[in-house]
Image (cartoon, rainbow, N blue to C red):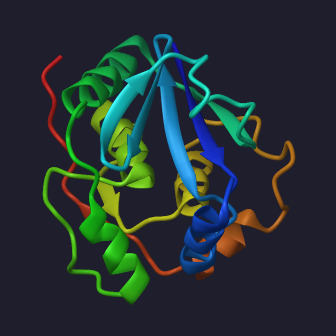
Amino acid sequence: MTACVRLYFPADAFGRLICWRLESDYSHATIEMDGTIYSATFPKVVGVGPADPGFGMPPRTGHAFTVRLSDDESARALAYCKSMLGTSYDVLAMAGWAFRIQSLQRPGHAYCFEYVYDALAAAGVFPASKRLLTGDQLLSDLYHAGRIENLMLGIRPSFDMHASFQKPAISIPTPKVNV
């Protein structure tokens, strides 16, 4: 079984501001599983079809990565994604990024990169979840976990070094889900 992690380039001035503050090429992330794209998007976590114009590629641009998962890992990631549907977007975490205040987080809520990371941590891909991470750091961790192969297709060669220079993410306990 596989999942598709999509990292999006900014589509507007707000997206470019996010990239500037995160020191990242990516302003948004989603995960596609079982024909649904799951996204932590203000104001809440949603699940949409792949043809939804707000989340598909195109019209938005970026990179898509196939993540290898076992059937059990896929079931746990999907259970996590579904369990978070309707949960509010973590605006405080974004404020934390904007003002460099790591303590601004709401437990049980996530922004886009955290949501995708949480789903993969719930699956067992990562030993713990992380907070205040960037798309580059998510990509780097997926690469080091040996879960993606199509990494160098259009990615800057120094992505891993770039991720290491970004503000470090904070490890937290892995989210628990019932499958």
* Residue at image coords 64%, 28%: 56
Which image quadrant is residue 5 in? top right
Q: Is residue 33 above or below residue 119?
A: above
Residue 126 in view here: no
Point 26% across, 23% down: residue: 82
Residue 63 pos. (x, y %): 73, 42
Point 48% across, 81% down: residue = 167
Q: Is residue 155 visible?
A: yes
At x 22%, y 76%, the residue is: 104
Residue 125 in percent (x, y) is at: 41, 38
Nearer to me, 55 or 162: 55
Figure check: 31 above or below 74: below
Residue closest to the eye, 9 or 63: 9
Residue 171 place in picture, x, y as percent? 29, 65
Quarter of the image for residue 70 reads: top left
Horizontally, residue 3 falls left or right of residue 104, namely right
Q: Is residue 156 left or right of residue 64?
A: right
